[in-house]
Amino acid sequence: MPTIVDTEVSKSARITGRVISGVVVLFLLFDGAIKLVPLPVVTETLDRMGWGASDTLARSLGIITIVCTLLYSVPPTSILGAILLTGYLGGAIASHVRIDSPLFSHTLFGLYLGLMVWGGLYLRDGNLRALLPFRR
Protein backbone atom coordinates (compact mmCIF):
# COMPACT_ATOMS: atom_id res chain seq x y z
CA MET A 1 0.00 0.00 0.00
CA PRO A 2 1.56 3.35 -1.02
CA THR A 3 2.06 5.85 1.72
CA ILE A 4 1.06 9.46 1.45
CA VAL A 5 3.93 11.80 2.19
CA ASP A 6 3.07 14.98 4.01
CA THR A 7 4.61 17.80 1.99
CA GLU A 8 3.32 20.53 4.27
CA VAL A 9 5.95 22.76 5.78
CA SER A 10 5.41 24.41 9.15
CA LYS A 11 5.09 28.18 9.11
CA SER A 12 8.26 28.67 11.17
CA ALA A 13 10.29 26.34 8.91
CA ARG A 14 9.01 28.14 5.81
CA ILE A 15 9.89 31.56 7.23
CA THR A 16 13.33 30.38 8.36
CA GLY A 17 13.94 28.88 4.92
CA ARG A 18 12.88 32.09 3.21
CA VAL A 19 15.17 34.17 5.42
CA ILE A 20 18.17 31.89 4.78
CA SER A 21 17.40 31.79 1.05
CA GLY A 22 16.93 35.56 1.02
CA VAL A 23 20.38 36.12 2.53
CA VAL A 24 21.90 33.78 -0.08
CA VAL A 25 20.03 35.49 -2.94
CA LEU A 26 21.06 38.98 -1.82
CA PHE A 27 24.69 37.94 -1.45
CA LEU A 28 24.83 36.19 -4.83
CA LEU A 29 23.04 39.00 -6.67
CA PHE A 30 25.55 41.48 -5.19
CA ASP A 31 28.41 39.14 -6.14
CA GLY A 32 27.09 38.82 -9.69
CA ALA A 33 26.50 42.56 -10.01
CA ILE A 34 30.06 43.53 -9.04
CA LYS A 35 31.32 41.07 -11.64
CA LEU A 36 29.19 42.70 -14.34
CA VAL A 37 30.79 46.12 -13.84
CA PRO A 38 33.60 44.61 -13.35
CA LEU A 39 35.28 46.34 -10.45
CA PRO A 40 39.09 46.25 -10.25
CA VAL A 41 38.93 44.10 -7.11
CA VAL A 42 37.12 41.44 -9.18
CA THR A 43 39.64 41.33 -12.02
CA GLU A 44 42.57 41.49 -9.58
CA THR A 45 41.13 38.55 -7.65
CA LEU A 46 40.61 36.56 -10.86
CA ASP A 47 44.24 37.26 -11.76
CA ARG A 48 45.50 36.15 -8.32
CA MET A 49 43.49 32.95 -8.71
CA GLY A 50 45.26 32.23 -11.98
CA TRP A 51 42.40 33.04 -14.36
CA GLY A 52 43.87 36.29 -15.70
CA ALA A 53 42.51 39.82 -15.25
CA SER A 54 39.76 39.41 -17.83
CA ASP A 55 36.76 41.74 -17.92
CA THR A 56 35.01 39.26 -20.24
CA LEU A 57 35.46 36.36 -17.83
CA ALA A 58 34.27 38.51 -14.90
CA ARG A 59 31.14 39.55 -16.82
CA SER A 60 30.47 35.96 -17.88
CA LEU A 61 30.73 34.76 -14.28
CA GLY A 62 28.46 37.61 -13.20
CA ILE A 63 25.80 36.61 -15.73
CA ILE A 64 26.04 32.94 -14.69
CA THR A 65 25.76 33.88 -11.02
CA ILE A 66 22.73 36.11 -11.56
CA VAL A 67 20.89 33.63 -13.82
CA CYS A 68 21.46 30.71 -11.43
CA THR A 69 20.41 32.87 -8.47
CA LEU A 70 17.24 34.01 -10.21
CA LEU A 71 16.39 30.38 -11.03
CA TYR A 72 16.95 29.53 -7.36
CA SER A 73 14.73 32.38 -6.15
CA VAL A 74 11.69 31.38 -8.25
CA PRO A 75 9.79 28.45 -6.64
CA PRO A 76 9.09 26.40 -9.81
CA THR A 77 12.80 26.44 -10.77
CA SER A 78 14.37 26.60 -7.31
CA ILE A 79 15.74 23.03 -7.33
CA LEU A 80 17.33 23.54 -10.77
CA GLY A 81 18.84 26.81 -9.49
CA ALA A 82 20.18 25.06 -6.39
CA ILE A 83 21.79 22.35 -8.52
CA LEU A 84 23.41 24.94 -10.81
CA LEU A 85 24.61 27.02 -7.86
CA THR A 86 26.11 23.88 -6.31
CA GLY A 87 28.17 23.33 -9.44
CA TYR A 88 29.21 26.97 -9.55
CA LEU A 89 30.24 26.97 -5.89
CA GLY A 90 32.09 23.68 -6.39
CA GLY A 91 34.16 25.38 -9.08
CA ALA A 92 34.94 28.21 -6.67
CA ILE A 93 36.06 25.70 -4.05
CA ALA A 94 38.26 23.92 -6.59
CA SER A 95 39.84 27.22 -7.63
CA HIS A 96 40.69 28.04 -4.01
CA VAL A 97 42.12 24.56 -3.43
CA ARG A 98 44.30 24.96 -6.54
CA ILE A 99 45.95 28.14 -5.25
CA ASP A 100 46.14 26.91 -1.64
CA SER A 101 43.86 29.60 -0.16
CA PRO A 102 43.20 29.60 3.59
CA LEU A 103 40.91 26.64 4.33
CA PHE A 104 38.17 27.94 6.62
CA SER A 105 37.85 31.53 5.37
CA HIS A 106 38.26 31.13 1.60
CA THR A 107 38.28 27.53 0.41
CA LEU A 108 35.27 26.36 2.43
CA PHE A 109 33.23 29.54 1.91
CA GLY A 110 31.59 27.93 -1.14
CA LEU A 111 30.63 24.97 1.04
CA TYR A 112 29.10 27.25 3.67
CA LEU A 113 27.11 29.07 1.01
CA GLY A 114 26.05 25.78 -0.61
CA LEU A 115 24.79 24.49 2.73
CA MET A 116 22.75 27.67 3.09
CA VAL A 117 21.38 27.25 -0.46
CA TRP A 118 20.17 23.72 0.20
CA GLY A 119 19.21 24.31 3.85
CA GLY A 120 17.04 27.28 2.96
CA LEU A 121 15.43 25.39 0.10
CA TYR A 122 14.85 22.31 2.26
CA LEU A 123 13.10 24.36 4.92
CA ARG A 124 10.84 26.23 2.49
CA ASP A 125 10.00 23.48 -0.04
CA GLY A 126 7.77 20.62 1.06
CA ASN A 127 8.44 18.67 -2.15
CA LEU A 128 12.17 18.61 -1.46
CA ARG A 129 11.48 17.54 2.11
CA ALA A 130 9.38 14.67 0.78
CA LEU A 131 12.12 13.69 -1.66
CA LEU A 132 14.85 13.78 0.99
CA PRO A 133 13.20 12.94 4.31
CA PHE A 134 15.26 12.83 7.48
CA ARG A 135 14.23 9.87 9.56
CA ARG A 136 13.83 10.16 13.31
Image (cartoon, helix red, strand yellow):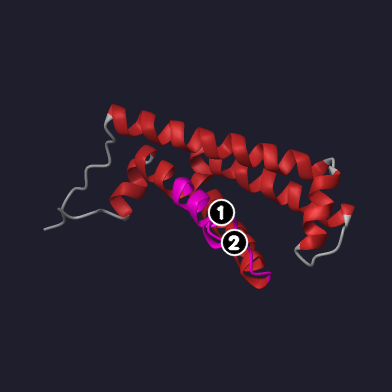
At a point 42% along the width and 43% down the height, the residue shown is 121
Q: Is mark 1 on a helix, strand or loop?
A: helix
Looking at the rendering, which quadrant does residue 122 occupy? Answer: top left
- Tell me whether circle 2 and circle 1 mark residues in contact (CB < 8 Å): yes
Q: Quadrant of the N terminus?
A: bottom left
Q: Chief secondary structure of the magenta span?
A: helix
In this view, the residue farthest toward the left is 1
Residue 63 position in % (x across, y down): 75, 47
Quickly name the residue at label 2.
102
Whole-number angstrom distance, CA of label 2 to CA of label 1:
6 Å
At a point 71% along the width and 43% down the height, the residue shown is 32
User: Which residue is nearer to you in this view: 94 or 68?
Assistant: 94
In reply to whether residue 23 is colored magenta, the answer given is: no
Q: In this view, does 34 lie to the left or right of 23?
A: right
* Vertical order, 135 against 15 (above or below): below
Q: Is residue 77 left or right of residue 11?
A: right
Residue 48 position in % (x across, y down): 79, 61
The magenta segment is 99-117
Q: What element carries label 2?
A: loop
User: Which residue is nearer to you in this view: 80 or 59?
Assistant: 59
At a point 61% along the width and 43% down the height, the residue shown is 69
User: Which residue is nearer to you in this view: 38 or 60?
Assistant: 38
Quickly name the residue at label 1.
105
Name the residue type under label 2.
Pro
Name the residue type under label 1.
Ser
At a point 78% along the width and 45% down the height, the residue shown is 35
In the rendered structure, find residue 129 and report the number of the disc placed on it: none
